[in-house]
Image (cartoon, helix red, strand yellow):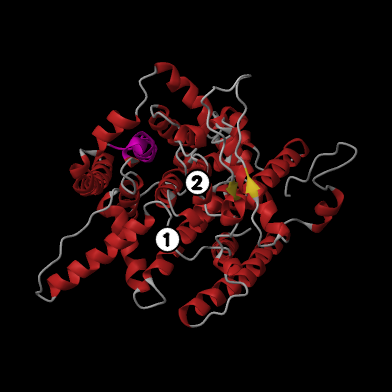
Amino acid sequence: MSAASVRKTAWILLFSLFACYLSLAPATTSGRGYVYEDMQSGLGLLTSFNAWIKGRPVPPISWTRHGPVALFLDLPFIKFGKFFISPDFVLSLQPLLLTAATMVITYLWLMQLCTPGMSLLLTLIGAFGTMLWPYAYIGLETKQSFFVLLAGYMALASGKIRTLPRLMLFSTVCGLSISSKSTGNVLAPAIAYLSHVQFRNESRSQWKRLLTVLLISGGIWTIAAVGANLFWAPHGGGMNLLLGQWTTDSPLQLFTNVLGIFGSPNKGLFVFAPVLLFSMWAIPRIFRTHREIALFALLVTACTVALVAILVVSADEVWGPRFLHVSIAPLLVSIGAAWPRFQRQTTAPLLILGAIGLMISFLGAFFYYGARGEAAQAAGQNTLEWFGGDTVWNEVAFDGRLFHVWLKGGTGPVPWTPAHHWAWVPPQDAQPWKTINLRQYVEPQSYLLRYWKAPLDGSALLVYRICWTSLIAGLLLLAWVIVRTIKTIPAARLISAPIFTLRGRKASPTS
């Protein structure tokens, strides 16, 4: 594919993924972690700015837990929402757009390493077969993941940075990578490595470029840290809360947490992004041929794991291991670098793991992540430890149970008792397990499905039509991307050398 053709395909892919995500979106930020708090803070900031401009008394600003940098990124969406439908709806589109853009950057990076078919396959598996899909609706982590991947792409896949505009852009992206969240500074080693790759083996004059990156990125981080402290200081300080309340005092748990981060049945990364199992073999495989990619993916993952491993629980109540969201795209790039074309011994497992991931991610995208927490609270079992390690409250199994109830339909109660198995003899004073009604939690979070038969008017009807139009447009655009990719495979080779053969022939190198 020519460079112009790749760019065109990438744009179509961006619109198709965004539209597909939008078709099943909840169209709200309410109940999505701290996103709704950020929106309220953004609205207050706009009100304060408007009062200051007009010379009126300025109301106090309520800062958010992640500081002003993340808030400033929300302001264009919040401002536009004041004129179109609502700030809540428009801000809910931001994580959809960022997730789609993250996968497009992944696609562009993979196109430098893989055949078009393999690039598109890994991109689509990442978009719909990992926890990136549910988090497009949850709204957390998407900013940081986008900027970290963009920084990696600019440093490792776009050549040397020679011009001042590109240098300023790279410096800003690096700063946003470590400032989009209050815990983003743990990724500083990964971002520092990208700067090292860019400016190593150059003349002494390159120290000025490196200094520019340090000053701009460091300045952005300082603004974010000072702003975040305005939120955490009244609560005793963010670091004090982390060390005093959430940090484990058991050295052994550091080891077990690391294992659980990847392999826990309830919260393991390989459960919520099964395709990343390939990364266990991909990283060693590419360590000589694509060392920079391997080290970047390792640093992003290791820095995040180092933070999570010291906590009492390695994941919270949100879908899957959300802190590892940032490592999914870099690990996908590593997999593409290791296996750049379809091969019989790798394609079948890749498709199987992708299909498993699609089913798991569909459940996470179909239901509101907080439904399990509400059910556990009603049953009196809502502890973080039980969320992370109790198979009765495994969120994939729980959402699967909800999906079964939803498919059956009906309106009557569906009793379910989250009972556990006592170790042979229950305590004499043990309370009976509470029975809850699953029917209360089976409503899909998709706006389109929630209001499928409901009478709507005004802005509610407009949002419904937008979601319905997005479903059709997204599928058509995605089909267009697939057709464009298939056309890059020569017809003769496609017929004579299929991916899967019965006699052990090799797959076409252009497939």
- The local secondary structure at tag 1 comes to loop
Name the quadrant containing residue 441: bottom right
Mark 1 burial class by Cα count in 10 Å: few <14, some 14-19, many 20+: many
Residue found at the very far right of the displayed protein: 503
Write down the residue under mark 2. 378
The tag on residue 157 is: none
Task: Say left or right for 476 vs 195.
Answer: right
Residue found at the very far front of the displayed protein: 428
Q: Marks 2 and 1: CB-CB under 8 Å?
A: no
Mark 2 burial class by Cα count in 10 Å: few <14, some 14-19, many 20+: some
- The local secondary structure at tag 2 comes to helix
Q: In this view, does 200 lie above or below 29?
A: above
Amino acid type shown at disc 1: Thr
Choose mark 2 or mark 1, whichever is in front. 2
- Residue in the picture at 60% in, 60% down: 2
Name the quadrant containing residue 185: top left
Q: Over which residues does the magenta segment extend? A: 185-203
Q: In this view, does 373 lie above or below 285?
A: below
Q: How far apart are marks 2 and 1 (CA)?
A: 24 Å
Write down the residue under mark 1. 29
Amino acid type shown at disc 2: Ala
- Residue in the picture at 61% in, 51% down: 438
Please check the rendered image and state whether residue 306 is part of the magenta-colored stretch, yes or no. no
Task: Say left or right for 310 vs 319.
Answer: left
Task: Say left or right for 46 vs 490.
Answer: left
Most prominent secondary structure in the magenta stretch? helix
Name the quadrant containing residue 18: bottom right
Please check the rendered image and state whether residue 191 is part of the magenta-colored stretch, yes or no. yes
Residue 107 percent across, percent down from the top left: 56, 52
